[in-house]
Image (cartoon, rainbow, N blue to C red):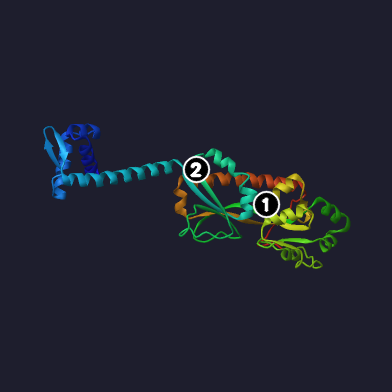
Amino acid sequence: MNTIQFFEAVARLSRLNLAAEELRVSPSAVSQQIKSLEEAIGVALFRRVKRRLVLTEAGELFYASSTQALGLIRNARSRVSRKQEYRSLVIRVAPSFGVRWLSPRIGGFVEAHPDFDIRVDATSELTDFDKENVDLEVRYGLEPPKGVNATPLITDQVMPFCHPKFAQDAALVGLNVTLGSARLIHTVKAQVTWQEWLERQDIDSVDSSHGLHFDRSSMSIRAAVDRLGVVLETATLAMPELQSGSLVPLAPHLGALCFPTYWLCCPPRHLNRRAVKAFANWIGEEAKEHESRKLRLLGSLGCEQYFDYKTDG
């Protein structure tokens, strides 16, 4: 590479001393590089005309090709340098988590790291880190996935939520009567089902097979806000509605089923990247703050008992 750069400088400037000055080396060093190049190729690339070095016919051909090659290399180096200024970060999250939890918060991370290019894929598809260009994934589930570094982020508190009017009616006529007459709202991809919750509460008078079924928590929560029924959901995703008062726990005295449910996942090697490490630290702190505020909120709404979903009941 150095030899070609030396050749290009001499061919362009026609003098060894000028090329040496530009390259910040001695004229003898330039001369030696040109001699080595001519010996390797097997032809003369220059002829001396008075005090100038003029390209031979072979030199002209080599100069055209070497100039083009050096231009490509310089452009590639420039693109790489510009890319390094903007660190790319690809994050995959569950759709409802992305919309309801990550989206309202990610502006803080962007402001703290303006040199990052961020892409968020909201999908239920699990990531194959060996085949896909994904840096980090926030995965939903009871257990951390195998073969990756998995850090627990959030613990879910699952319980029935409803419009305040439903809760008032339940206080008057009783929980069983309310659930028997209310429409049950199901999130079909949720970890805890209505049937499981009813069995744990020893409620066998309610048919859990009917109601509204949605494949996204955000849709289920919206339906409950619109007074379409009672939803069994997580306080994590329903927290904005609990804060505003548009939803309340139907039976806070019964407590909540709890389990670690959101995991920050990636191959261990990804944690060596600056962008990945920065996002992992940021989302960890955001999750801690969220958990603290959520428990205070649930306590203020009368929910103070928490049961391990995997062992209790």
Label 1 crowd bin: few (<14), some (14–19), many (20+), radius 10 Å: some
The residue lying at 75 percent from left, 55 percent from top is 223
Question: Percent position (x, y) of residue 44?
Answer: 13, 45
At label 1, the amino acid type is: Leu
Label 2 crowd bin: few (<14), some (14–19), many (20+), radius 10 Å: some
Residue extending farthest to the front is 57
Question: Percent position (x, y) of residue 187?
Answer: 69, 60
At label 2, the amino acid type is: Phe
Question: Percent position (x, y) of residue 208?
Answer: 76, 66
Q: Is residue 27 above or below residue 183?
A: above
Q: Of helix, strand and loop, which one carries label 1?
A: helix
Is residue 211 visible in the rendered structure shown here?
Answer: yes
The residue lying at 71 percent from left, 45 percent from top is 296
Q: Report which residue position mark 2 lands on.
A: 116
The residue lying at 16 percent from left, 45 percent from top is 57
Q: Report which residue position mark 1 lands on.
A: 237
Depth order, front residue of 82/218:
82
Question: Percent position (x, y) of residue 205?
Answer: 82, 67
Looking at the rendering, in which quadrant would you find the C terminus? bottom right
Depth order, front residue of 210/306:
210
Q: Which of marks 1 and 2 is nearer the N terminus?
A: 2
